[in-house]
Amino acid sequence: MNNFAVCGERVKQLLPDNDSIERIEIKGHPVTCGIIATEAPRFDSRAPEFEAQVLIKVRAFSCNYRDINLIFSALKRGPGESFYSIGSEFVAEVLDIGSKVTSVKVGDRVIGDCFYHGGGRSPAGQGVVTNHASKEYQIVSASKVIRIPEPMPDDVAASFTIGAQTTYSMVRKLDLEPGANVLVTAARSNTSLFAINALKAQNLNVYATTTSQQHADKLRQLGIKELFVVDSNLENFLQHEQIRDIVIETGGFDGVIDPFFDLHLPKILDVMGPGAKYVTCGLHDQYQKTIGQTTLYPQVSLKTVLLKAMFKNLQIIGNCIGTTSDLQRALNDYSSSSLPVVVDSRFSGKQAGAFLDRTYNSGDRFGKVVYQYD
């Protein structure tokens, strides 16, 4: 079976005929990657240990921001002749099912269901299905996959789970009335692109921030009411004239969706209206320490944050992925054409380096990057 893997420095020497293996740079650090062949896992549908499992064949996969730290950690810790299969999201075909499986059948196309209800870092059966979504053949719990609509293309399906499940959970937690004003930060991030498309179907006024004019027209075409191009060095979003004008006009945003609390939380509290809700699903500083980088983000003062939240009756809400029902609602909205999915590009065959380079290095990327097996 195929594995899209990052490789130790001696793997190319051990596999000299593998012309998919090449070296690129990510964040200024060398990364060797390629397609590595291994044996497929054995699956016996009659065996008790597989009664609730399914055997799937991955057709396409994609990587997320979270994968960067996994990549660097694997290269730092693994020996030179080792490799590490990567990937967070996938679309696959069900090849076989255990004796007690009824939720899917052979031939179904499925994606991961990363339902997470809390209760610790990795409670049993919850969270991301796999950190190795590129493994072409996998045995997973039937509870961790969900059928997808027949018309959904593989590239869209391989881009769907985490962005859709996360943002639909965040929108649910905001629980805003029609006509409310919502600010989405880091508009070009994959999470924010999903959030914008999810919010605009709710009859909400969607505003967004970005630090670059690049793709500004594409972002506006998504239905944003107003796009704010902000200086990343701003200490407070109230210092931005357009944002300040909106706050004066409306009394502040009723809700905020933010994928990077370490970048934005200190800047955003003053532009929120009384009783507003702020929902965050992650942080930017995930891989920097692994590669020896020092971050220069402003320190978050817990006292300042809680004082402002107290005086303005703000709600600060954490969100990790979402529920199965969040994912199902997103699939239903996709089926009814109310949830577009932004896919940047597709790669296949020997384009291992090009796929990884586009995923993490291309400043003009807009949407998810997908690798499809032939």
Image (spheres, rainbow, N blue to C red):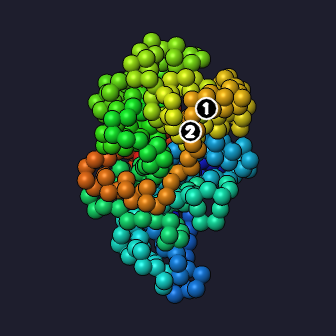
* Residue 64 coordinates in the image, percent (x, y): 52, 44
103 lies left or right of 84: left
Q: Earlier in the sequence, mark 1 or mark 2?
A: 1
Pick the front one: 283 or 266: 266
Mark 1 is surrounded, within 10 Å at the Cα level, by few (under 14), some (14 to 19) or many (20 or more) other residues, namely: many
Q: Is residue 74 left or right of residue 342?
A: right
Q: Amino acid at mark 2?
A: Gln
Spatial CA span between label 1 and label 2:
7 Å
For the point 32% across and 27% down, which residue is it?
225
Q: Which mark is residue 309?
A: 1
Query: Circle 2: is it few (<14), some (14-19), or many (20+) Cα within 10 Å?
Result: some
Which element is circle 2 on?
A: strand
Q: Position of residue 168 (x, y in %)?
A: 43, 49
Counting from the top left corner in percent of width and height, residue 120 is at 68, 56
In the figure, 91 relative to 224: above or below?
A: below
Residue 263, picture quadrant: top right
| Residue shown at 51% from the left, 30% from the top | 274
Between 43 and 121, the one nearer to me in the picture:
121
> Which mark is drawn over residue 315?
2
Question: Is residue 52 in sight in this rendering?
Answer: yes
Residue at image position (46%, 25%) is: 252
Q: Quadrant of the C terminus?
A: bottom left
Amino acid at circle 1: Ala
In the rendered image of this protein, does residue 301 appear above or below residue 11? above
Q: Are marks 1 and 2 in contact (CB under 8 Å)?
A: yes
Residue 296 has which mark? Answer: none
Front-most of 242 and 56?
Answer: 242
